Amino acid sequence: MPPLSVVEEDFLAPVVQALLREWGRETETEFGSRPTRGSMVSPNDFEPPKGAFFVAMLSGAAVGCAGLRRLNDTEGEVKRLFVSTLARRQGVAGVLLSAVEQRAAAVRFSSLRLDTNSDAAVALFVSLGYRPIVDYNGNPNARHWLEKRLCRPTRC
């Protein structure tokens, strides 16, 4: 596999915006509409220290992204996890999620939540330790909600 790395980027950086446009086009094609109210995000959501946005680079090309945003004092949320079609099935999503999880643990979140409309994504999330939960955010675009408890340096 070509070299894969993850870098932290500003949400408004051109590389991030290009990936999010691709995510939006794919979402519209796959689900028939652009995301609405329940999945909207703000650039402020991803500002450190409680938020972050990551880009996966494969052989120097941006191929995926994922964001961490604060839900409350103890929980974070994974947003905009996306891997370009040509880079799928190469472990990119897992590497991105690992970066998000490491940052979430570093800022002392005890759990991470996410939502998705993709049945295929659920299998990936479950394989990485996420468990189904009830709807926590009222996102009308989602059909699945998941959570992962995080280990902290002082406890697991």
Image (cartoon, rainbow, N blue to C red):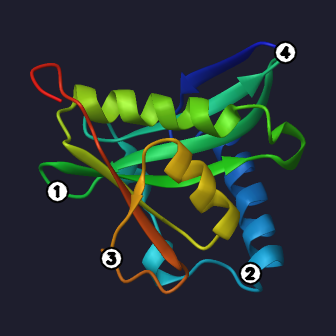
Which residue is rendered at x = 60% and y = 77% of the image?
A: 35
Secondary structure at badge 4 equals loop
The residue carrying pointer 1 sits among few (fewer than 14), some (14 to 19) or many (20 or more) residues within 10 Å by Cα, namely few
Instruction: Specify the label residue 31 is tagged with.
Output: 2
Q: Are marks 1 and 2 in contact (CB under 8 Å)?
A: no
Spatial CA distance of label 4 from label 1 is: 38 Å
The answer to which of marks 4 and 3 sits earlier in the sequence is: 4
Spatial CA distance of label 3 from label 2 is: 22 Å
Residue pointed to by mark 3: 134
Q: In front of the other: label 1 or label 3?
A: 3
Near-viewer residue (43 or 78): 78
The answer to which of marks 1 and 3 sits earlier in the sequence is: 1
Q: Is residue 9 above or below residue 27?
A: above
Which residue is rendered at x = 55% and y = 45% of the image?
A: 127
Q: Look at label 4 and name its amino acid.
A: Pro
Instruction: Specify the label residue 2 is tagged with.
Output: 4
